[in-house]
Amino acid sequence: MIENFKNIEYLKFGNERQKNAFSEIKKYKILDKLKKYNPILVGTIPIGIDLPESDLDIICECQNHSEFSAYLSENFSDKMEFKLYSIKQNGIKSTIAEFKTDNFLFDIFGQNIPTQKQNAYRHMIIENRILNEKGSKFKQRVKELKSKGIKTEPAFAKLLGLEGDPFAELLKLENKYYRKHRE
């Protein structure tokens, strides 16, 4: 089971899409360029529940959104379909850059929160532990729901019988899965 998602070396030993993601991230030096922002690749590709159209999501910790925006523009605006914008997500300002490389769409996401405490990372860790506990049939069912247009967290919530906001309900499982895998 992968526990250290901060080092993308695990992708080299994964499925074809994970290997391609590793190559693309290295080719364009994405994580090297983002190093000062403590980047972590999150989402469905690291845990192997991606679809062909899934993008590469990289979260970053940025103290200053203006500086982060300027840095993203300076380093990635030459990429295809580059977009840069800010939104509020759960009341937290987020700066996002989107662009395409040869084989992937990238979303670089910055918040003034340490990356390991951001919800995207926390969700991925919980989902990874659930997938490891529930096995390949559960994983296949998640991918089937996703292929029907259901987002990742709602797919997990549906299969686990969670009611309410799927994003919040998954976070409630954090202590259960963290404690279980620390023992």
Image (cartoon, rainbow, N blue to C red):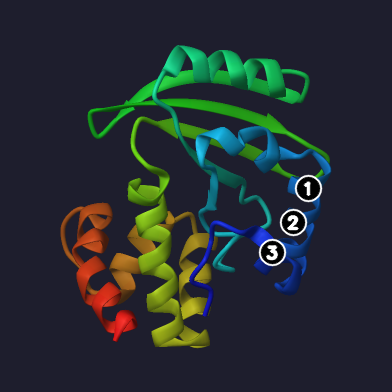
- Cα separation, mark 3 vs mark 2, equals 8 Å
Q: Residue at 60% across / 38% down in the picture?
A: 35
Counting other residues with Cα less than 10 Å from the Cα at mark 3, is it few (<14), some (14-19), or many (20 or more)? few
Q: Where is residue 133 in the image (x, y as percent from the top left)?
A: 39, 86
- 96 or 158, nearer to the observer: 96
First-in-chain label (1 vs 3): 3
* Residue receiving disc 3: 9
Q: Residue at 26% across / 57% down in the picture?
A: 166
Residue type, label 2: Phe
Residue 26 marker: 1
Disc 2 and disc 1 in contact, CB within 8 angstroms: yes
Quarter of the C terminus within the rendering: bottom left
Q: In which image quadrant can residue 147 be found?
A: bottom right
Q: Is residue 158 left or right of residue 121?
A: left
Disc 3 and disc 2 in contact, CB within 8 angstroms: yes
Q: How many labels does the image show?
A: 3
Q: In which image quadrant can residue 163 be found?
A: bottom left
- Cα separation, mark 2 vs mark 1, equals 6 Å
Q: Position of residue 47 (x, y in %)?
A: 54, 67
Residue type, label 1: Lys
Q: Is mark 2 on a helix, strand or loop?
A: helix
